[in-house]
Image: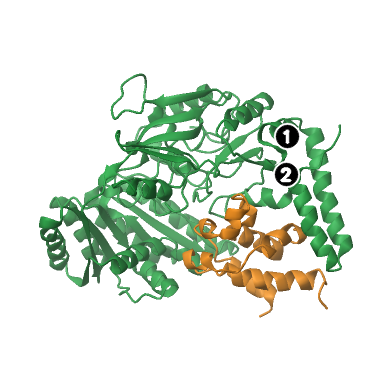
């Protein structure tokens, strides 16, 4: 077989030449040859690689060590595996062709957006192909029909920004909206802060363009606000974590921008007071745009990184946005302030100026990453409980923190009962890591006990496979699991689409 | 602390969220290639200082294309300064490859 040097390798060679000038000819040339050798061996053993090259162009099929290293994991270190190749998709039309090749040779294939998954959902668990979809970022706003069309590589923030140019906005706002792609957000059925009122991605998608496991291109749903034609396969593929089909384009709903937003932050001395405030705000029918919580550890982290000076008290912060017409909005905000006062808030900030508003939101955003400041390991928490149980959940997590003596920073979209008790621990310290894992398990068990769920918006991935089955068992939903396995087989008979995730791998059974 | 220790310590703070990626002009001009993104740089540096089998040459192009503008530093929720890391990494590379005496 004739071996052609692909462009990327040439680029590497160029870099190596630079280094050669600095006097390390031998090492560098060895490196260059090792890449060439890897390419030759891979290509000789895997004829599908040259087929991929002819579809996307040789410069977009990356086989070098560094690229494979960069695409081996999501946002957590606990799960990783290098893919055989990374394919940069530059046009939507390439996806069906690439999937056809993968289907023909039975090569595992994982579609990837920005790779910010905290559950290991983007890890190529069996190697194979990783599709880097980020270049598919076209967005078109159809104002007349209230629809925004977006390719899957566009970030959620990009879509929101485009809508805002026309006086609209896109409601789902994962904290990572700056990086989270539409494809990733759909695959994980992401939520966000505005989920307190507007729900999750599933509630805002009307239609998707999908590529099935054999490379067939089709569409689920219609670009109308209502549609009852056929089974709701759209609902099935949203939140399927790439195990059923690859989404390439989405038709999304958008909302008119509210006239005005007032942001109220209350800082509390005890978790019970904070929990009661969250419950009362919902119970008394305020209907906030966002209703967020960040605990002491989270606020401390934000103060440190951003140089803020917000009170880091034991009860943390409850952050509320109310929106609507300018007149009368003051009244609603005052009601929130009143509820906070009734529950012994130590400090209340009512913000209308953009700077304070942004800072408060930033505190909440940075709080999520608090464990990352102190520990090299991170276990994502993503539970949701019924609204009346928020207080119990907050207290329960606090008890688990004390019991296992681990670092837990709890933040959350408390308005919809969703909490993120994130654990920080040293992965290299076996004893500490085991404690952290036990604490994570207990937090999930707590959610199940309180009548909640182990995942609200981050999904299962590799992280929560055991807990998914646990929840199904407790809730008498094992038939759901059986159906899931059947559906997976139906959609993906060769098991090539993001295999070994979602408790669908061979090692998982009832 | 020498540059190796600094690199080991600071790269541990990266939680791979990717906020930095979209702020990076180097990433943008290199066709949105992860290899030329701040997150890519941190990941490669981390591998470079922690994994004995990792070939330093793999990371050179990535590390030397950081223009040290620090836009990523503004975005980073855990306060990783990739520009500073890149400079330490260049020092580390130079010493390792024995290029600068």
Q: Which chain is green?
A: A
Viewer-nearest residue: B37 or A472: B37
Left/right placement of residue A219 relative to residue A315 reads: right
**Which residue lies at the image location 55% right of the left edge and 22% below the top edge?**
A216
Task: Tell me what residue is drawn at x 63 percent, y 74 percent.
Answer: B6
Q: Is A478 rendered above or below residue A177? A: above
Nearer the observer, B24 or B86: B24
What's the chain of the residue with tag 1? A
Q: In the image shown, does A4 or A100 lie closer to the viewer?
A: A4
Task: Read off the residue under disc 1.
Answer: A49
Q: Is residue A295 visible?
A: no
Q: Which chain is orange?
A: B
- Is A322 displayed left or right of A72 in the figure? left
The answer to which of marks 2 and 1 sits earlier in the sequence is 1
SS category of the residue bearing label 2: loop
Looking at this view, name the residue that lies furthest to the top.
A230
- From the top left corner, tell me how far across and down residue A303 is, in percent: 39, 73
Image mark count: 2
Q: Classify residue B97 as left or right of residue A407.
A: right
Q: Which secondary structure, mark 1? A: helix
Q: Which mark is residue A63?
A: 2
Contact between marks 2 and 1 (CB within 8 A): the answer is: yes
């Amino acid at each position: 077989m004739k071996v052609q040097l692909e462009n990327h390798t040439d680029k590497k060679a160029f870099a190596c030449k630079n280094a050669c000038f600095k006097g390390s000819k031998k090492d560098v040339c060895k490196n260059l040859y090792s890449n060439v050798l890897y390419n030759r061996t891979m290509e000789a053993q895997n004829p599908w690689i040259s087929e991929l090259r002819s579809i996307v162009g040789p410069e977009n099929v990356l086989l070098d060590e560094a690229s494979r290293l960069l695409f081996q994991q999501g946002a957590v270190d606990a799960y990783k595996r290098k893919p055989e190749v990374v394919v940069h998709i530059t046009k939507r039309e390439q996806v069906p062709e690439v999937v056809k090749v993968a289907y023909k040779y039975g090569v595992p294939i994982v579609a990837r957006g920005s790779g910010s998954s905290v559950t290991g959902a983007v890890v190529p668990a069996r190697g194979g192909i990783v599709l880097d979809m980020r270049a598919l970022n076209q967005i078109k706003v159809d104002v007349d029909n209230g629809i925004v069309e977006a390719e899957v590589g566009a970030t959620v923030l990009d879509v929101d920004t485009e809508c805002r140019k026309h006086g609209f906005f896109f409601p789902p706002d994962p904290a990572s909206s700056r990086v989270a792609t539409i494809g990733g957000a759909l695959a994980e059925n992401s939520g966000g802060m505005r989920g307190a009122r507007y729900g999750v991605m599933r509630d805002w998608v009307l239609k998707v363009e999908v590529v099935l496991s054999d490379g067939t291109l089709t569409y689920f749903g219609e670009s109308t606000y209502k549609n009852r034609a056929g089974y709701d396969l759209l609902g099935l593929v949203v939140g399927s974590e790439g195990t059923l089909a690859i989404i390439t384009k989405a038709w999304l709903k958008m909302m008119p921008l509210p006239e005005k937003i007032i942001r109220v932050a209350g800082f509390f001395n005890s978790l019970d007071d904070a929990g009661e405030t969250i419950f009362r705000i919902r119970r008394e029918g305020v209907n906030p745009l966002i209703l967020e919580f960040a605990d002491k550890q989270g606020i401390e982290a934000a103060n440190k990184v951003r140089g803020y000076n917000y009170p880091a008290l034991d009860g943390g912060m409850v952050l509320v946005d109310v929106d609507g017409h300018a007149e009368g909005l003051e009244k609603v905000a005052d009601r929130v302030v009143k509820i906070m006062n009734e529950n012994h808030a130590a400090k209340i900030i009512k913000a209308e100026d953009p700077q304070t508003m942004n800072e408060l939101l930033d505190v909440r955003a940075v709080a999520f990453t608090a464990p990352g400041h102190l520990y090299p390991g991170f276990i994502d928490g993503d539970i949701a409980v019924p609204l009346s149980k928020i207080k119990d959940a907050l207290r329960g997590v606090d008890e688990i923190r004390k019991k296992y003596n681990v670092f837990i920073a709890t933040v959350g979209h408390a308005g919809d009962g969703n909490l993120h008790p994130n654990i920080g621990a040293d992965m290299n310290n076996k004893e500490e890591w085991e404690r952290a894992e036990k604490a994570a398990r207990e937090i999930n068990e707590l959610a199940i006990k309180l009548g909640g769920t182990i995942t609200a918006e981050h999904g299962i991935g590799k992280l929560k496979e055991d807990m998914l089955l646990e929840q199904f068992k407790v809730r008498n939903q094992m038939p759901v699991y059986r159906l899931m396995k059947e559906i997976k087989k139906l959609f993906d008979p060769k098991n090539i689409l993001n295999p070994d995730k979602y408790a669908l791998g061979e090692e998982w059974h009832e | 602390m020498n540059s190796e220790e600094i690199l080991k310590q600071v790269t541990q703070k990266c939680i791979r969220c990717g906020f930095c990626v979209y702020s990076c002009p180097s990433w943008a001009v290199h066709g949105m290639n992860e290899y030329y993104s701040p997150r890519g740089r941190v990941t490669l540096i981390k591998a470079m200082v922690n994994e004995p089998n990792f070939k330093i040459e793999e990371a050179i192009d990535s590390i030397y294309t950081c223009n040290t503008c620090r836009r990523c530093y503004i975005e980073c929720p855990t306060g990783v300064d990739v520009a500073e890391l890149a400079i330490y990494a260049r020092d580390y590379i130079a010493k390792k490859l024995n290029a600068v005496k």
